[in-house]
Amino acid sequence: MSALPPRQRLGHLVRSLSKHLPGQLDGLLENARFQDGAAALQRLADPAHVEKALARMSPEEAGWLADLLAERWSWIADVQLDPEVAIVAPDELWVGAEPIRLPLSLAAVGLDEGFEAVWEGAVLPGPPASSATLLARPPEGKAPGIARVRAQVRASVKGQRCVLIAQAQVALRRPSVVVSDDRRRLLAQDHTGRPAVGCRLEIGPDTHVTGTGGLVELEVPAQPGASLKLEGIPAGRIPGGNP
């Protein structure tokens, strides 16, 4: 099982497959019978096509597809994975009024032990290391917030020195909760108006999970002045109470 996060694992597997499988098939793809398969491999060799497909997948779907693809490849030939490194980071992060610091690490395939990296972007400064600390600052205004990180990894593969580049970006979302006049409907979203679906919304001592469109519907009105937290980040109070 690869140590890479699911989407990175699937992308790595697809790149390795499109590179090695044609040679493993020893000319079979030139036969007209395999025309559709050859065309599919050509699409997989297009980075833009792969990245577009990965962006639409959930981590669970990407992990399932990577398992299936590796299994099917093993039926035909030995799975040959190129050296790869990835930054282990969340896809998104909820940020309040203060910056958040979050540990980052590297996951690697096919590298010798003892690699290190020079980190750039939204990280705290430090010497070359296999880990870093993300510094996520609150997004301003209504523009989408993104923290970009890059790691130049100095490593070796079977004793041969190499340099690999890993990149990641984390969407930064500042919480906002709109409360209906009757205090029974709460709409959770971020600063851009994007709904917060499947997120943890704390209303005073009670915890709810947001549904379709970021909505939480209560059987009884929320208590005026009750605190609101979205994914653990303060998001104001229920109107009508004392500040």
Image: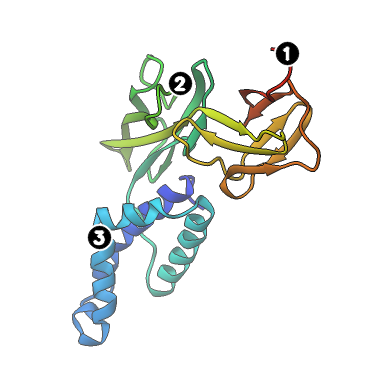
Amino acid type of the residue tagged 1 in the rendering: Asn
Mark 2 belongs to which amino acid? Pro
> What's the CA distance linking mark 3 and mark 2?
37 Å
Residue 16 in picture, x, y percent from top left: 32, 57
Residue at position x 74%, y 18% in the image: 241
- The residue at which mark 2 appears reads as 138
Mark 1 residue element: loop
Tell me which amino acid carries mark 3.
Ala
Judged from this view, the residue extending furthest toward the left is 30
Circle 2 SS class: loop
Q: Quadrant of residue 70?
A: bottom left
Residue 45, numbered label: 3
At 54% across and 36% down in the image, what residue appears?
189
What residue sits right under mark 1 in the picture?
Answer: 242
- Mark 1, Cα crowd under 10 Å, few <14 / some 14-19 / many 20+, is few
Q: Earlier in the sequence, mark 3 or mark 2?
A: 3
